[in-house]
Amino acid sequence: MKKKIAYPLSHQEPCVTSRGVLHSVLALGMAFIVIQGHAQSPVLPKGPLVKVIAVGQTAIASFSEMDGLIEAVMQSTLSSQLPGRIISLKVKAGDAVKAGQVLATIDDRETQTGILRSQAQLQQSDAEMRQLQIALQRTQELKAQGFVSSAALDLAESQYKAAKAGRDSVGAATEQAKLTQSFSKISAPYDAWVLETYAQTGDLAMPGKALITVFAPQPLRVVMQWPASEKSVLPKLQDIQIHIGRDVVKPLSMQIMPNADGVSQTIGIKLDLPKSGAAAKAVPGQQVRVRTSGSSQAKGLVPSAAILRRGEITAVYVAQENGFAMKLVRLGADHGSAGVEIWAGLKEGELIAVDAVQAGMKGAHAVR
């Protein structure tokens, strides 16, 4: 009878433990391979790609700026040419009017009476002239027949000529009365806008007393004051730019006043504006900047889109290893398409974002 050999339990446990360790080692190895694969694969940024440029010096013409004021080339202050009460005022400030349109009416009863008087005198003169003309014809016939002397004929002719002259004088007086009567209606001298009214219905109008101011919307011009001490270096037309808001306008012509103002010690310069573009939207009284260019100088310029404006803060985004950092800057003059001048806050060679809005987004990174 064979005996069964029973292995102790302590001999079976090492077998099970060895298999568990083997599985654990394989699992750790696979995890290490996966982690290593992830570590070696590049992590692509998710933010926008923002183009950057290097800060440097750019040669640009130097300039000086002065304030200018837009005014209408054609502006008129209308007043009455005869005294009388204003019986109607048909316009107010801001109204558009056409040439010849009646703006106000003065009481014309007195002038109408003068016209009636002149017309009656004219009719009387016509009757007297016709009577003397008939008498002259009769005298001429009698003189041909030898019944009257030459002196009688001369007298008839002189009487007729005097009556004709008197008739012409009365006719001229009638036309004068009609012209005076037309002064009772104040009309627009050209197509215009009403700038201001200085009277109301019922006020007394007097010759020389301003009633209405009108101006033509086009053409316009800019008036600036140049220091009299710099008369020897007056600007040239091709060196002048007019900044109306963000728009730049070149003047068509320039007129320099021949005298200086005794109080301000300045010389007036008038610059005619074109009738199209930004100048067509300008209005009289609007303030503009007049820029006169000079010699070229090296200046640090950045694009206008690269500047971040938040209230009184002005900054740019400077490229860093992990994105962008906002940096405060002090701005100088705006040179339009050439860029904005940077006075302080940047060093030459620093990379800044061309678009400040995109550079401020999360995950934004630089690309050249």
Image: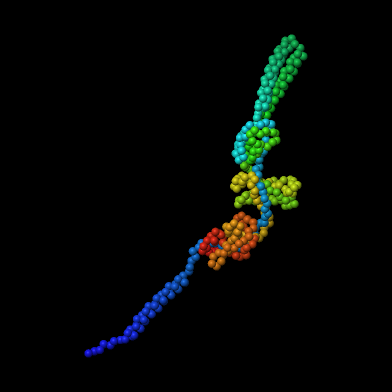
Residue 49 in view in this figure: no
* Image position, residue 315 (x, y; %): 59, 60
The answer to whether residue 343 of the structure is visible from this angle is yes
Q: Is 18 on the left-hand or right-hand side of 59? A: left
In the image shown, does 305 or 93 lie closer to the viewer? Answer: 93
Residue 99 lies left or right of residue 207; in this view the side is left
x and y, in percent, of residue 59 in the image: 65, 59
**Image quarter of residue 27:** bottom left
Q: Residue furthest bottom?
A: 1
Q: Position of residue 64 (x, y in %)?
A: 68, 54
Q: Position of residue 164 (x, y in %)?
A: 71, 20
Taking the spot 61% from the left edge, 50% from the top edge, the residue there is 245
Which residue is drawn at the image coordinates 59% and 63% (left, top)? Answer: 327
- Above-or-below relation of 212 to 23: above
Q: Is residue 203 above or below residue 226?
A: above
- Reply above or below: 301 against 67: below
Residue 112, picture quadrant: top right
Task: Please name the residue shown 48% across and 68% down the image.
Answer: 43
- The number of callouts visible is 0
